Image: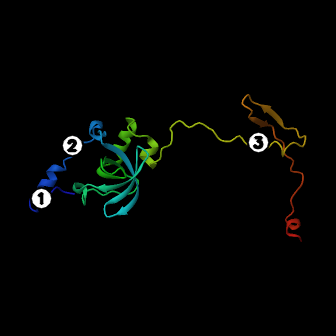
Amino acid sequence: MVKNTHGGNKHKKFARKRDESGRNTINNLKKTPGQEYGFITKVLGNCKFNITCYDKKERIGHVRGKLRKRTWFVMNDVVLISLRDFQDDMCDMIQKYSYDETNMLISNNEITESFGKTGGFFQTKTEDKQANISFLDEMSDGSDNEIEQEPNNNKIIKNIKTNYEDEINIADLMGL
């Protein structure tokens, strides 16, 4: 859209203040004391949003007056919020991060990738801590399966041979 250079109430003033040259440096994107990163999880209406903050708390965020009708916030946006001293469950949204700015925060380890993309707090290094399930009791029919025992009591089954000698007849299943 073309910059309005003449006419209109306050258009020149707003156009000058919206000059975003040099805004995308990491020092301009970092939080300061009293601020926190947030992820919008739900739109409540009336410029209010449910926000999952980086300190793992749910807060209701309110759009700052300067940003109303100028910056549109939607679900799954990463925002910078200002914490309130007198209300811990409320906060003020003071900046919206674009996709490129969010990636810059992720690359500089300000936020985790899972928080920047989904608002979750997943660990980047996941270890497989699933329950070890063994089905050996059902297979103890003396077949030719080779079973190895690992040091941590996990059993590995190798060379499972199956017999497909019995054919299934559809007429037998239907009772015909």
Determine the image quadrant of residue 32. top left
Judge depth for marks 1 and 2 and give the one in front. Answer: 1
What whole-number distance in Å separates the C-alpha atoms at marks 3 and 2?
61 Å
Front-most of residues 49 and 124: 49
> Farthest residue in the front direction?
86
Image-based side of 150 in relation to 171, left or right: left
- From the image, tell me which residue sits under label 2: 21
Looking at the rendering, in which quadrant would you find the C terminus?
bottom right
Label 3 belongs to which residue? 134
Q: Tell me the CA gap for discs 3 and 1.
A: 72 Å
Give the structural element (helix, strand or loop) at label 3: loop
Mark 3 and mark 2 lie on one chain; the one further toward the N terminus is 2
User: What residue is drawn where x is 27% and y is 56%?
Assistant: 71
Tell which tag, 3 or 1, sits nearer the viewer.
3
Left-right relation of 93 to 15:
right
Which amino acid does the dot numbered 2 rest on? Ser
Q: For this view, does 145 lie left or right of residue 28?
A: right
- Residue at 12% of width from left, 54% of height from top? 13
Q: Is residue 135 left or right of residue 87?
A: right
Q: Residue at x 24, y 42 (%)?
A: 23
| CB under 8 Å between discs 3 and 1 | no
